[in-house]
Image (spheres, rainbow, N blue to C red):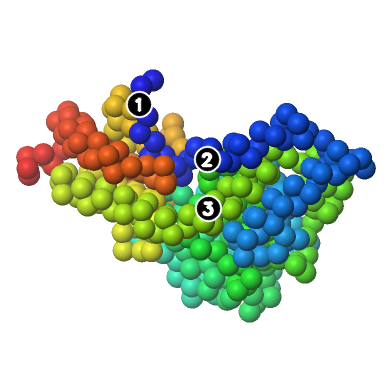
């Protein structure tokens, strides 16, 4: 493949060169087991603790509150199961209709296991009603899980306010912050959030490493049992090089937060404005809500998102329909359905997700290519009258 224009950073990100460099030593020379009693292993333990401190700085918490896991999905599952096992009398979960499958499909499964789940609705901008949240909590509720930012639309949820409401009721609050971390500021110390998930490969660290934050004093039941790693909270020999990478990536993400808010959001806005100016009959999903600086979800009426992606792929442009996890099905994503995006638009949805590695030139290239792609597809669409308006 020749040139790759990578606008799919909500699916996964490139490992930063500095991250790779930091990791290399732990594959070749510092390969000891951090649990070993010899000094060779002991020095690895010290590097693990440094990585823990770096992640804690990104999240505004203390290092003891960080548990390293294998991915965002494991962190999400651990949080939910921990609450259910810590409060075995409570059989109710509150979440939303727009969660990532890591929470959504887990909750669907737990319903079959006899738990009751309340899925909070969102409005057409993907926003929650906090009064509905308050009403949903009962004495039976074990945990409330609300994502910080949506992976498909980038819509940011008011999780700090939600956490206060939930805390008032004496219920645990978890947030899936996989898309938020490194893109918007997070300060857990100043919040009432009890549990929070992040994933390395969404912030320029490698795949296969994640974090679960557990607030000090929170009742916690481990998901994996075995050795005493992670203070007895997550058994299994640590993914040392992945953790070192995530530590470095967290340090860089903290330093680059300003760049996300200015450089990346400026690129996203150029793309958004350019598309609106060049292509008729499109809509920007979540445009009226607070959004992540890097995410643009756009629906093109009367075309198939998958067809757009295939044609873009011929030009080396990588994007997503926003619902990688439901691809293969004819249904529009559960997120777009929850937002009541009209059917003729929802099917033609493409998610562009940018990063600090993208350039203005790449945005200009996409703006050059995409109008032609949409015109070609609309010309062969049996439903389309959109082009005649032009
Ligand atoms: C990617 C993603 C996950 C899953 O993370 P993995 O590390 O791939 O398991 C969970 N939640 C959200 C919002 C995500 O975007």
C-alpha span from label 2 to label 3: 10 Å
Left/right of residue 134 with respect to residue 173 in the rendered view:
left
Residue drawn at x 64%, y 55% as measured from the top left: 55
Q: What residue did someone put label 2 on? A: 16
Mark 1 or mark 3, which is nearer the start of the sequence?
1
Real-space CA distance between mark 1 and mark 2, rounded to the nearest whole angstrom: 19 Å
Q: Going from the N terminus, do you reach mark 1 or mark 2 first?
A: 1
Q: Find numbered disc 2 in the image and state the secondary structure of the residue it sits on.
A: loop
Vertical relation: 145 (above or below) 271: below
- Is residue 190 visible in the rendered image? The answer is yes
Which quadrant of the view contains residue 124? bottom left
Which residue is labeled 1 in the image? Answer: 3
Mark 3: few/some/many CA within 10 Å (<14, 14-19, 20+) = many
Q: Residue furthest bottom?
A: 168
Q: Residue at x 42, y 47 (%)?
A: 356
Dot 1: what SS? loop
Circles 2, 3 touching at the beta carbon (< 8 Å):
no
Counting from the top left corner in percent of width and height, residue 188 is at 61, 67
Between the C-alphas of marks 3 and 1, the distance is 26 Å
Apparent side of residue 279 relative to residue 111 in the rendered image (left or right): left
| Residue under the image location 51 percent in, 56 percent down | 255
Residue drawn at 30 percent across, 47 percent down: 298
Q: Which mark is residue 41?
A: none
Whether tag 1 and tag 2 are in contact, CB under 8 A, the answer is: no
Q: Quadrant of the C terminus?
A: top left
Q: Is residue 180 left or right of residue 293?
A: right
Residue 207 appears anywhere in the view: no
Spot the residue most to the top.
Answer: 1
**Total numbered labels placed on residues in the image:** 3
């Amino acid at each position: 493949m020749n040139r790759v224009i990578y606008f799919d950073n909500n699916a996964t990100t490139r490992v930063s060169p500095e991250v790779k460099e930091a990791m290399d030593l732990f594959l070749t020379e510092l390969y000891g087991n951090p649990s070993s009693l010899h000094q060779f292993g002991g020095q690895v333990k010290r590097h693990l603790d440094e990585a823990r401190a770096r992640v804690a700085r990104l999240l505004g918490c203390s290092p003891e509150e960080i548990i390293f896991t294998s991915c965002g999905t494991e962190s999400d599952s651990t949080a939910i199961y921990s609450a259910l096992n810590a409060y075995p009398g409570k059989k109710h979960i509150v979440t939303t209709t727009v969660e990532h499958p890591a929470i959504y499909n887990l909750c669907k499964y737990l319903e079959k296991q006899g738990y009751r789940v309340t899925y909070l609705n969102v409005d057409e901008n993907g926003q929650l009603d906090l009064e509905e949240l308050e009403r949903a909590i009962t004495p039976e509720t074990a945990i409330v899980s609300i994502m910080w930012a949506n992976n498909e639309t980038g819509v940011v949820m008011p999780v700090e306010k939600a956490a206060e409401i939930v805390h008032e009721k004496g219920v645990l609050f978890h947030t899936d912050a996989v898309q938020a971390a490194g893109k918007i500021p997070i300060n857990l110390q100043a919040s009432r959030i009890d549990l929070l998930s992040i994933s390395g490969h969404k912030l320029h660290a490698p795949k296969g490493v994640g974090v679960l934050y557990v607030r000090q004093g929170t009742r916690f039941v481990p998901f994996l049992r075995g050795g005493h790693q992670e203070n007895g909270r997550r058994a299994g020999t640590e993914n040392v090089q992945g953790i070192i990478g995530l530590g470095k990536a967290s340090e860089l993400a903290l330093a680059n937060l300003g760049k996300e808010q200015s450089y990346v959001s400026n690129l996203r806005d150029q793309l958004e404005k350019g598309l609106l100016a060049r292509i008729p009959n499109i809509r920007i999903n979540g445009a009226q809500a607070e959004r992540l600086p890097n995410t643009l979800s756009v629906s093109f009426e009367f075309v198939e998102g998958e067809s757009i992606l295939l044609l873009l792929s011929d030009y080396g442009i990588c994007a997503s329909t926003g619902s990688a996890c439901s691809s293969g099905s004819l249904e529009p994503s559960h997120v777009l359905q929850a937002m009541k995006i009209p059917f003729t638009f929802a099917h033609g949805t493409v998610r562009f997700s940018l990063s600090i590695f993208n350039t203005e030139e790449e945005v200009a290239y996409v703006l050059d290519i995409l109008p032609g792609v949409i015109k070609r597809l609309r010309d062969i669409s049996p439903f389309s009258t959109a082009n005649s308006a032009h």
